[in-house]
Image (cartoon, rainbow, N blue to C red):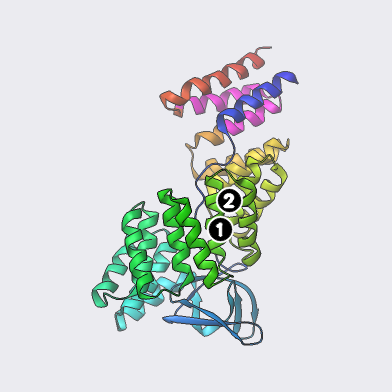
Amino acid sequence: MRRIVVVGLAFFALVGGARGEPKDAERGPVGTHVVSTPAEVRFVDAGGKPLGAVRGGTVLDVLETKGEMLRVDRGWISRKDVVPQEDAIEFFSRQLSDAPTAVGYASRARVWNYRGEYDEAIHDCNEGLRLDPDCATAYDRRAQALTAKGQVDEALADFERAISLTPDYASTYSYRARAWLEKGDFERALADCDEALNRDPAIYLAHYVRGRVWTRQGASEKAIASYGRAIALNPHYVPALNARGNDWYGRGKFAEAEADYSAAIRLDPKFDIVHVHYNRGNARLRQGKTELAKADYREALKHDASYLPAMQGLAACFAAQHDYEAAVEWQEKAVKLANAEQKAKLKSVLAHYRAAQNK
């Protein structure tokens, strides 16, 4: 058994824990995604008291239904003010065909952003700004797309313009905080999170971005608390579950990490599918759940057949089960795909497996 432990430690020193930068997306409801369609949608509490507003094109999480009302992550809204996420592009396209407006283009751009079609989003925002150079929503949505594409300086300029035009939208500060995070300016990122929460204490995105800052600074306890606040406000916010899982893993809390990854997979099976399954596989392997870990690594490889870390994970699982022939086979596959810098470490682990196989 001592030999198994040494091999396992070599694997984890090499592969590490969570993989993949946390993905950002506004998630959908207890199964469905809805998108706000008017230029501005107001939501209320259970008694009908106004709570605030969201712009058109916002992707919302439905938590409960009651007649013609939906409880989303921000409050209650009318069904007539939303469409299913999968129908949103067609809906806004029809609107734009009938009557092109800056707000219409900006609303469709938000849905493109949600789908990861950032060039389409930028194109729509440009069209909107051509119609109305002072459309704050178009600047905001273009800035989100530019942030995702790594064009952070351009994004910050757009966020500044959006805020100068409409300074009261908390979401804009939250998204700008993410841009500051990408730029590595943690102080400004935290300041924007505070600004967003001062305007809207229920904006879970600000808590999530704040958690990302703490993670980047190595303050995992603070990060976990921030992700927890985001999840408390929106239990279906998958990026926060995934990110908290990563920090639990880093603290050696493998059962907690597995639970968060499992919740993320249950709520959105397609979310960052390769990395989340790989990460859960690592958490399971650390707990000795080798068959479950193998299933996760295989799921990751099903969606990315050349994902080297999942091959290493499978090799480690087989080694833990004393099946060194299979361990060698998977580690050899990883070695073949590795670059020059990785090969030496991978070959070292492969040598352990071969030595164990020959005993």
> Given the current orientation, which residue lies at the most extreme bottom position?
48
Point out the frontmost of discs 1 and 2.
1
Q: Please report contact status of discs 1 and 2: CB closer than 8 Å, yes or no.
A: yes
| Image location (x, y in percent) of residue 309 | 53, 34
Distance from the alpha carbon under mark 1 to that under mark 2: 9 Å
The magenta span reads: 312-336
Q: Is residue 315 magenta?
A: yes
Looking at the rendered structure, the kind of residue marked 2 is Ala
Residue in front for this viewpoint, 31 or 186: 186
Question: Which label belongs to residue 208?
Answer: 1
User: Is the stretch drawn in magenta largely helix, strand or loop?
Assistant: helix
Q: Is residue 134 left or right of residue 195?
A: left
Q: Quadrant of residue 178?
A: bottom left
The residue at which mark 2 appears reads as 243
Relative to 240, is 97 above or below? below
Q: Is residue 118 magenta?
A: no
Please, what secondary structure does the residue beneath circle 2 have? helix
Relative to 48, is 189 above or below? above
* Mark 2 Cα-neighbour bin, 10 Å: few <14, some 14–19, many ≥20: many
* Mark 1 Cα-neighbour bin, 10 Å: few <14, some 14–19, many ≥20: many
Q: Is residue 25 among what the camera can see? A: no
| Image location (x, y in percent) of residue 216 | 52, 45
